Image (spheres, coloured by chain):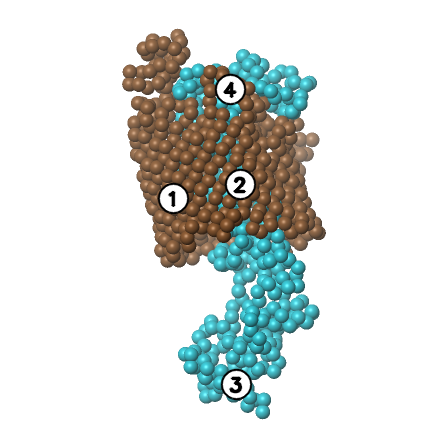
Amino acid sequence: MNQARRMSTRVAFLGVAGLLLVSVASAQGIRGDLRIVGSYIEYRGLVRETVPESTVAGDGITRKLPDGTIVTCIPGGDCYYYRPDEVTSTTPVTEDLRFTAWPGWQGVSARVHLRGRMGSDAFWPQSSAKTQALNAYVEVDRERFRVRAGRQDKGGGLGVHYFDGGDVVWKAAGPFRLEAFGGRSLDRSAVQPRTGSLLSDVDVLAPDKPAFLVGAEARVRLAREFNGSLLYQREEMTDNAGVCSQRMALEASWIRRPVSVDIASNYDLVFSRFNAARVRLSGPISRRVDLAAEVRRYRPWFESWTIWGVFNPVGYGEGKLEAHWAAAPGLQLQLGGAYRDYDETEAGADFLPIDGDGWRALAGANWTRNEWSASARLNVHRGFGAYRSSLDISAGRQMGPDAWLGVYGLGTQQFTEFRFGDGSSRGAGVEGRWSRGRIGVDGTVGLYRHSIDNSPAFDDYTQIRGRLGLTVGFGAEAVTAQPGRGKERS
Amino acid sequence: MRRRGVLVAAVAAAGVLGLIGLGSFAAGDRFPHPTHDGLFSEGCPTCHAGIAGGDRAAFYSATADLCGGCHDGTSAPRVELTTPARRPTTLVFDHQSHVGERGIECLACHRDPGATGAMDVARARPEACLACHEAPAHLDEQARCATCHVPVEKAPSVTAERMRSFPKPPSHGTPDWSRRHGTPAASGATDCSFCHDSGFCSDCHNPGTTPGFHPRNYLLRHADEAWNRDTDCSGCHSTEVFCRSCHLGSGRAQRAADLNAYHDAEPLWVLNHGRAARQGLESCASCHQQTDCIACHSAKSGWGIKPHGSWKPEAEGGSEAMCRQCHVQVPGD
């Protein structure tokens, strides 16, 4: 039976690979780009130090070294603390090749997205996966249906899921659209089976069997104002040892200009609990002011091959208000705030309270005039686990149609509820992008100064971070290179 | 007689153009239809013979001889006849079925708004399509794009730069669009694929390395976001592979870490970690492996400390594989 299954898997894989090759080789049209990004990031890790308990003055679990460093002592054993490691650097490099090919048959195309990490050092997450296919599928898209086969991703109310298999969409007449999909399930971040090395490297209880994914989605569009989708998804181990996940998501939006209401929720069928539910109402309250109000319920979700779900994580309810004011031509101001309150945990010691609520506030401004733009943003976040206040400012100038140059600065203070030391950082940098035809270059470099108060073991240090990207479009109808379309990541 | 009238009209038109400094047309200039009003007895097919029959090669059928009848350098300035290149478009409109088969007049779609002359023509506007094809306003989120357009991935001649020049739906200009676009996209409220190819989404929503989704310097201050989950990290990242591998590499997560050395601001962390775990379990799992917890909480190999709180497996379900990590006998068996 297993042999037959393996054989049919191989046949399916070879079939899709063959179709891919034929599509690409006979392509009448091909369009894509190659993007190479290299970064240089200095960082300072943590090292755990041990000193004999007998050499540390005092008693109890928490004590101080002569320089004021807090240590945790095991009576009759050792005392432990964390100190900063030497400043070192990492150089993650990624190469992304994306293209779509049309072989010239009606509705048929092939899409491929390959990622390489050649040149990366070992520190950055997933660096050991030197080459990877994020997408490699053949698509047949006709008036009433769409079929995809190969490695693909399914996005929606449950996030993004990758799988090797098939996906069929039936574009039914009228307001309905039905979709069914299934295949070998892949880990969201690693884009490899859960039996792969990336997962087993970080969890000794990683599954030893791959999982299969099946799902279906129905979409409906009613009365020109309402749209909704219901998505069901189940992942199960191949040996039927258990369910990895079984969830549903409901998404709906009701739009009657200028007001819109969005509803999003997802439900864990394994634990019979809602993980997220959100209602957002937005619209203008005057000619220049837009307001958005949101109520939200959130409870963490974990895959069911882990034990985390049975630890009964609690959720929180949150209310949020945001206002956007078009104060003057080219000037947009933003003000917002949110408050959240956690459910009762039924755990811990009453005489050791921790925060059971949190709030955030935001004030921002964006300004544009001709080729100039600037923004400023102030965030204050007092929450369970970690607090932060930060100010970001940036300004940039479009230098003709092909280039953009900007500068930015930041100041941020951050500290955690469960560790000593208030961290603060100040930094500044420059960023820019340039493109000419099919070639684009983008990059940024910044200098940051980090300090941690109340922790003698941590001295201040200066960090350099930089990133350089190259994008080359190709194909008969190549996409114009658009380097740095998004914002900087780190 | 008619020929003479044509000649007079052409001379008059040329004179007007000469007066405003446009004595000759440079290549790429649009043909001045209104100034030729009344010159062509056969109307539009005089120069666009292929429209009704769908013969694309004859969409622009005017010849240099036809123009030269007037623009001979004497009666009117000489002109150079150029045929405009076909514009890259996502439109699926075909003239044959509209003009040839249904007999729809050219001016029904091509009349310049507000003008009345027989040759006051302009490029067709979407409103002209909507006059017959019942739909809400053009670019309305509820409009069926497929009535007139193909998805951009099926129009390879349309470059990203050209797409950027197309008008945007009104929703895209609302201040909070970047935050709220997920629900309309997931619920099918918008036909995103007609203007965006699949690579557009992955520019921001790609796992791993693509900058875009998070604001600048997010790495520096993701801790409070992660603790409080303003954004659902698990939609894109798996806690184990993404978070833990980085925390392990930087020394923040250490295997077999002892008691509370890291959580040094909580002297009695062991007593109180349960509350923190219930509120921020995703953050715990971003450093700790399951075995760290099982060491105490397993009924099989640990101290048997029950971690479930008010959760009742018989009422709320669970996975057998998960139960067997800590129990020999799965509850309910």
Of all chains in the rendering, the one displayed in brown is A
Q: Residue furthest right?
A: A173
* Mark 3 in CB contact with mark 1 (< 8 angstroms): no
Q: Residue at x 67, y 34 (%)?
A: A5
Q: B302 left or right of A436?
A: right
Residue under pointer 2 = A293
- Farthest residue, direction bottom: B1
Residue A35 coordinates in the image, percent (x, y): 44, 47
Q: Residue furthest front?
A: A286
Residue B22 image offset from top left, x and y in percent = 43, 78
* Amino acid bearing label 1: Ala
Tell me the tag on residue A376: 1
Q: Label 3 to label 4, Cα distance in Å?
A: 92 Å
User: Which residue occupies 51% across, 21% down?
Assistant: B275
Question: Which residue position holds label 3?
Answer: B9
> What residue is rendered at 44% in x and 55% in y?
A438
Q: Position of residue B49 (x, y in %)?
A: 61, 75
Q: Which of pointers 2 and 3 indicates the residue nearer the eye?
A: 2
User: Which circle, 2 or 1, is nearer the viewer?
Assistant: 2
Q: Quadrant of the C terminus of chain A?
A: top left
Alpha carbon distance from label 2 to label 1: 23 Å
Sort mark 1 into few (<14), some (14-19) or many (20+) by Cα contacts within 10 Å.
some
Q: Nearer the viewer, mark 1 or mark 4?
A: 1
Tell me where residue A427 sits by quadrant: top left
Chain B, which colour? cyan
Q: How many marks?
A: 4
**Helix, strand or loop at mark 1:** strand
Up-down: is A434 above or below A91?
Answer: below
Horizontal side, residue B216 vs residue B66: left or right: left
| Chain to which the residue tagged by mark 4 belongs | B
Residue under circle 4?
B274
